[in-house]
Image: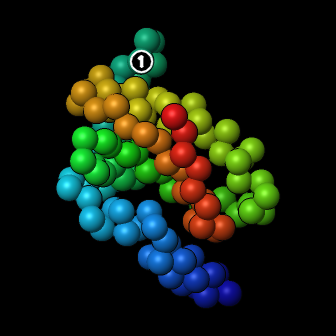
């Protein structure tokens, strides 16, 4: 059942508008490692994906949480601090000010943060 669910998730994502946008991206970086000092805290991790459309950059973070479609917006708020920290690191390390997109793979929903 998990294998079938994974296949369905992948098929749904490949048919999404976001996937089409990523496929047409002018620049694209996957699993980009970073380390960034934020005050007393050292942030380390890997950005799932960043891509460029024209003059704009987008930071995409994939989540595998199994949630109901009606919970996506409220559940996404739990991840806002993480995406904000990643975006701050990109801005300070690379001069990139990305829009932030959280993707719940289980439902196919995308939440964009300003």
> Which quarter of the image is occupied by the N terminus?
bottom right
Q: Residue furthest left?
A: 26
Q: Residue at left 74%, top 62%?
A: 69
Q: Is residue 25 above or below residue 45?
A: below
Give the structural element (helix, strand or loop) at label 1: strand
Q: Is residue 1 left or right of residue 8?
A: right
Asked whether 30 or 112 is in front, the reply is: 112
Q: Is residue 70 above or below residue 85?
A: below
Asked whether 111 or 2 is in front, the reply is: 111
Q: Give the residue pinned by disc 1.
A: 38
Quadrant of residue 66 within the rendered picture: bottom right
Q: Residue furthest front?
A: 54
Asked whether 8 or 56 is in front, the reply is: 56
Q: Is residue 16 above or below residue 49?
A: below
Q: Residue at left 66%, top 67%?
A: 107
Q: Position of residue 16 (x, y in %)?
A: 49, 71
Q: Residue at left 37%, top 37%?
A: 98
Q: Residue at left 71%, top 53%?
A: 72
């Amino acid at each position: 059942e998990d294998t079938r669910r994974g296949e369905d998730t992948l098929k749904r994502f490949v048919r999404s508008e976001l996937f089409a946008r990523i496929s047409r991206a002018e620049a694209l970086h996957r699993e980009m490692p970073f380390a960034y000092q934020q005050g007393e805290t050292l942030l380390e991790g890997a950005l799932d994906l960043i891509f460029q459309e024209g003059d704009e950059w987008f930071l995409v973070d994939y989540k595998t949480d199994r949630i109901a479609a009606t919970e996506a917006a409220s559940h996404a708020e739990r991840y806002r601090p993480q995406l904000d920290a990643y975006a701050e690191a990109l801005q300070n390390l690379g001069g990139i000010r990305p829009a932030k997109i959280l993707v719940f793979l289980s439902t196919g929903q995308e939440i964009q943060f300003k």
